[in-house]
Amino acid sequence: MDSLEEKRNLLKTKVQELFPTPGMLQTCIKGFSASLRTAPTFNQHCFYKPMAIVVLQGKKQTTLGSEKFTYNENQLVVTSIDIPTVGSIVEASPEKPFMTLILELDNYIISQLLREGNSSLAENVRRGMGVAEADESLLDAFYRLILLLKQPEKQKIMAPMIIKEIHYLLLISPLGDILRSVNTKGSQNNQIANAIAWLKENYREPLKIDQLARKFNMAESSFYRHFNKVTSLSPLQYQKQLRLYEAQRLMLSENFDAANAAYEVGYESASQFNREYKRMFGTPPKTNVNQIKSA
């Protein structure tokens, strides 16, 4: 058994110890979570935050706009911006669960590391999500982080150090350009990331592409093209998905009915909201919410 496989097996054992039943677990270390699933799932909609995912076992397919990503055992997934995705776990069983470790990424740490010397930058606009092989040094860092879950006396000092190390390893990995480009002030990816942050705060407002492009000092055609390159969506599609996800949250968590949720997120027509909601989630709002609640 080579050392990479040995490290992965040690991580699998530690992850399984965390889960009396399958699910998702946010650990006591902020931003560090794990998941274990024993059955396939299909077409689950979610917003990926900037994060690194290490797949320890199983296989998943994620659709980002029109592009599909497939990742399986010993692969690393990095997202640099908030991205709406549709995911399906395609290989998972009680005998071989789908297992991942997830670390939310901190833009401040990345910017700090870039100032300290990791500032080389690819000129091309990069998609905000990528997949590569996880190397032994990264697995080792995650292993040391997971060991801290049972060493609370060491967490306060050691966890931030290991988390910074993981950020550094990501920056020098084959996916480092994804993170560097978004976190380098003035780069095209950085401008798109700023536009996405603005959209997240102002998704209820009518969207005018020319005004948004000017706000971030880009020509309209360039802004549209680069936004699509980073997210695989147009700005209008991105705004629509923000609205629909927030409407779903309002109905699930705050007991809004469909019409009130629609108006709250910026729709002027409840019927248009119902059509677009069904197109995205597969069923009308009330049916979809009831299905989620009873799952």
Image: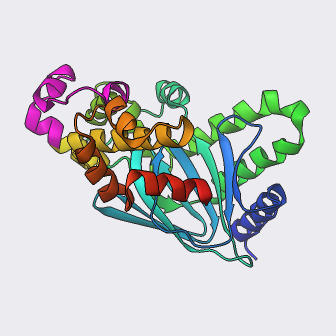
Query: Could you tell whether 8 is left or right of 259 in the image?
Result: right
* Quarter in which the N terminus is drawn: bottom right
> Which quarter of the picture shows residue 269?
top left
Q: Which residues are magenta?
A: 196-224
Judge by depth and name the residue closer to the eye, 169 or 67: 67
Residue at (74, 79) in percent of width and height = 95
Residue at (14, 24) in percent of width and height = 211
Query: Could you tell whether 151 is left or right of 75 in the image?
Result: right
Q: Position of residue 271 (x, y in %)?
A: 24, 46
Judge by depth and name the residue closer to the eye, 153 or 67: 67
Q: Position of residue 47 (x, y in %)?
A: 45, 46
Q: Position of residue 242 (x, y in %)?
A: 36, 39
Query: Could you tell whether 233 is left or right of 243 in the image?
Result: left
Residue 221 is one of the magenta-drawn residues: yes
Q: Is residue 120 above or below residue 278?
A: above
Q: Is residue 182 visible?
A: yes
Residue at (28, 42) in percent of width and height = 240
* Quarter in which the C terminus is drawn: bottom right
Residue 85 is one of the magenta-drawn residues: no
Judge by depth and name the residue closer to the eye, 87 or 249: 249
Judge by depth and name the residue closer to the eye, 98 or 7: 98
Q: Position of residue 178 (x, y in %)?
A: 40, 45
Report the magenta stretch's main SS: helix
